[in-house]
Amino acid sequence: SEKLIKVLFDLARYHQPTTIFIDEIDSILSSRSAEGEHEASRRMKTELLIQLDGLIRSREDRVFLLAASNLPWELDMALLRRLEKRILVTLPTAEARTNMMVANLP
């Protein structure tokens, strides 16, 4: 819920330096244009975006957000604007896969 997100970021600020890792962020911050989205889900997304806006309140704040997604094209555009850096890790090539298999053979 939105209350838990607020508490998470408050705790991170209190115990800084802190890294908040959100795996599969697309599950909670997919595009808001989806039909049939529940009001609680919209409120949670809004609170997360508000917390991201206020992530660096001053130069002394040292809270780092790291997020991972298997579906980056489904992320909300408002989230993408707030992320300072985005890194796309593509699938390995066929040659790289072969090398990994050979390296891990008994």
Image: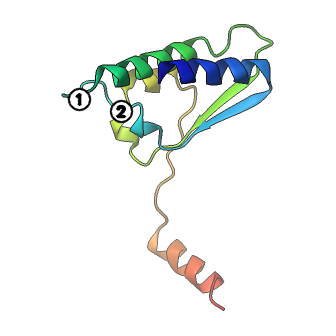
Cβ–Cβ under 8 Å for marks 1 and 2 = yes
Q: Distance between the residues labelled 1 and 2?
A: 8 Å
- Where does residue 79 sit, x and y in percent of width and height? 45, 24
Q: Say left or right for 99 vs 16.
A: left
Q: Nearer the viewer, residue 7 or 26?
A: 7
The residue pinned by badge 1 equals: 34
Which image quadrant: the C terminus? bottom right
What residue do we see at 41% from left, 41% from top?
Answer: 72
The numbered dot on residue 15 is none
What residue do we see at 53% from left, 26% from top?
Answer: 83
Q: In which quarter of the image is residue 12?
A: top right
Q: Quadrant of residue 6?
A: top right
What residue do we see at 25% from left, 27% from top?
Answer: 37
- Where does residue 88 sit, x and y in percent of width and height? 49, 45
The residue pinned by badge 2 equals: 30
- Where does residue 25 sit, x and y in percent of width and height? 47, 37
Q: Which of 42 and 50 is in front in this view?
A: 42
What residue do we see at 80% from left, 26% from top?
Answer: 17
Mark 2 element type: loop
Looking at the picture, which amino acid does disc 1 mark? Ala
- Where does residue 82 sit, x and y in percent of width and height? 51, 21
Q: Quadrant of residue 26?
A: top left
Q: Say left or right for 22 vs 81.
A: right
Looking at the picture, which amino acid does disc 2 mark? Ser
Q: Say left or right for 94 vs 42.
A: right
Q: Nearer the viewer, residue 22 or 88?
A: 22
Mark 1 element type: loop
Q: Nearer the viewer, residue 16 or 89?
A: 16
